[in-house]
Amino acid sequence: MSRTLGAAVALTADEHLALVDRRAARNYAPLPVVAAAAEGAWITDIDGRRYLDCLAAYSAVNFGHANPTVLAAARRQLERLTLVSRAFQHDQLGPFVQELAELIGKDMVLPMNTGAEAVESGIKVARKWGYEVKGVAQGQANIVVMAGNFHGRTTTIVSFSDDPEARENYGPYTPGFRTVPYGNGAAVAAAVDENTVAVLLEPVQGEGGVIVPPAGFLPEVRDICSREGVLLIADEIQSGLARTGRTLAVEHSGVEADVYLLGKALGGGVVPVSAVVADEDVLGVLRPGQHGSTFGGNPLACAVGRAVVGMLATGEWQERARGLGAHLDQRLRELVGHGVMEVRSLGLWAGVDIEPTLGTGKQVCTALAERGVLAKDTHGSTIRLAPPLVVEPAELDWAVDQLADVLRCLR
């Protein structure tokens, strides 16, 4: 039976789940939790039960649910101006692109909406740069990508995915990509030729299970790209903006990319905001009419993005992620040999490989949800933990204790 919460008519959890199953395309198989409100690191369902959020919307909620700084910026802008399209200027765009460019250390910003749009835009820019600047013959440009990648779900992006769930039956596929093993610099060097315009990679493969590359991999790829006249494109959509304890994950390797793809946390968990950030000799290839987006760089997105950039500029969120991440890593490693095979982490981001004989990652996440912890599985028996950076050490301890209890029950 329906019930009323305030002035809004709401459904029971069972009614909601049944309605979604009947009316929504079944492109997700989520846990049976129906969120109704959230604050900080906690989500409350429509029955009033609270859950510790250990996913943060795949790092889109790095700064916590209902972050007061982000909400204040959004409210101010909602009352002023939300959309004019890029056919006209507005007073938030200039400050946003300047502040973001300064934070990242590049000349220019191409604002878009979703992470996949940023990746698509980065691909287009790299190809255009290849033809107009590098001198690649028309139609011959290729981009080197990594095995195990996840960059989005568009037709072009799934064309170079090796995940059958993401790729199968969406062909014909977009050509122009060469896949090499992640972490193998020699394979990257072998794949680059005179028609290569870019190497596209995630500094940490999030969907792959928080796969951190070998220490020398990113510097080696940087050297290859510099030597061969190829753009290094870093997809920092999940790994960027303080998640790993640095503004950008490539900073851990002392590497600077030519092009950065940003998203998720850039919208503060309020609106979709993404961006391609690069120097003028790269982004300068775009001229009026050659690429665009009605909502990209809209006033509301820019106001929210400015609030996020302002928080990142202080460095406190990066420092917090480093400290909390070290604590989480230590606690998780105590579970190795007790139902956990391996832990990989960087900042407040961890991939935990569960012993396959105990169950799948989905089964573990379902059991965690029953105990009030929300996490997400990937690739069979791996779970990912990426709490909002506002989480407290005691809350992390409690979450790990729940995981330990789940593993004990499964053994």
Image (cartoon, grey):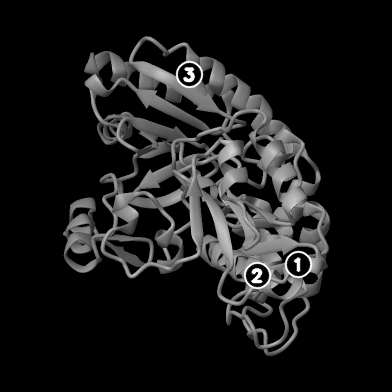
Examine the rendering and report whether any part of residue 220 can be seen.
yes
- Pick whichever, 12 or 144, lies toward us: 144
Residue behind mark 1: 282
- Ranked by sequence position, the earlier of labels 1 and 3 is 1
Which residue in the structure is indicated by mark 3?
332
Q: Residue at x 21, y 55 (%)?
A: 17
**In terms of secondary structure, where does tag 1 sit?**
helix
Give me the disc on residue 165: none
From the viewer's perspective, tell me whether residue 268 is left or right of residue 282.
Answer: left
Which label's residue is closer to the chain start, 1 or 2? 2
User: Are the residues tagged 1 and 3 within 8 Å (C-beta)?
Assistant: no
Looking at this view, is 323 or 8 the one in front? 323
Select label 1 or label 3 by which is in front.
1
Left or right of 10? Residue 219 is right
Residue 318, placed above or below residue 168: above
Report the residue marked by disc 2: 125
The three-letter code of the residue at mark 2 reads: Val
Q: CA distance from mark 2 to mark 3?
A: 41 Å
